[in-house]
Image (spheres, rainbow, N blue to C red):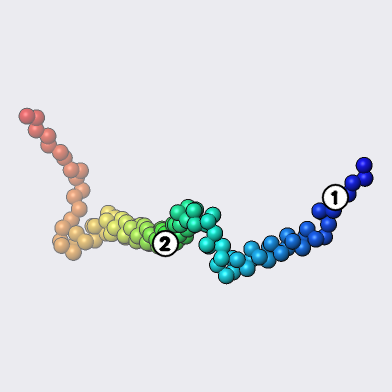
Amino acid sequence: MGKVDKSSSGTDKSVKSGKDVNALTQILNGEFLTKSFVLNNLPYIFFIILLLIVFVAKGYYVKQLNDEIKINEIELNQNAAEFIESKTKLEEETKRYKLVEKLQELELKESLNATKVIRIKK
């Protein structure tokens, strides 16, 4: 009844840490690349690397698009402000009293009679 499993003693941990060190040294010196698992799955590894490169490139592309959008928004706001300024200036220049002043320089007078429209029926 009182069987004790001796395989779960401290020696098991030292073997496990030895495997971890062995795996780390294989990664560092490149031995893991010669294993059949890596060689058999090489196309998938290359595909994952390609996906990572595309992912990074997409990030740079999105950053470039955001920069262009900000520049275009600034330019649009400047153009809108110039349009409003020009429209206001045009409205000021075409007010009735200013037009009367300009007509006086040309020795023309404003008509006091309302204009009449003559329509001809065909």
Who is closer to the viewer here, 19 or 119?
19
Residue at image position (18%, 50%) is 111
Q: Decide: marks 1, 2 in contact (CB < 8 A)? A: no
The location of residue 122, given as percent across then percent down, is 6, 29
Q: Residue at x 68, y 66 (%)?
A: 21
* For residue 3, side relative to residue 38 (left or right): right
Determine whether the residue tagged by mark 2 lies in a helix, strand or loop.
Answer: helix
Q: Position of residue 121 (x, y in %)?
A: 9, 30
Q: State which quadrant residue 103 falls in.
A: bottom left
Frontmost of labels 1 and 2 is: 1
Residue holding disc 1: 5
Please indicate whether residue 59 sits to the left or right of residue 3 in the image. left
- N-terminal-most mark, 1 or 2: 1
Depth check, front residue: 71 or 66: 66
- Residue bearing the label numbered 2: 64
Circle 2 packing at 10 Å, graded few (<14), some (14-19), many (20+), is few
| Residue type at numbered disc 2 | Gln
Percent across and percent down for residue 79 are: 35, 60
Comparing 57 with 82, the one in front is: 57
Please say whether residue 47 is visible from this viewpoint. no
In the image: residue 63, left or right of residue 103: right
Residue type at mark 1 is Asp
The image's mark for residue 41 is none
The residue positioned 56% from the left and 65% from the top of the image is 31
Is disc 1 placed on a helix, strand or loop? loop
Which is more toward the observer, 70 or 65?
A: 65
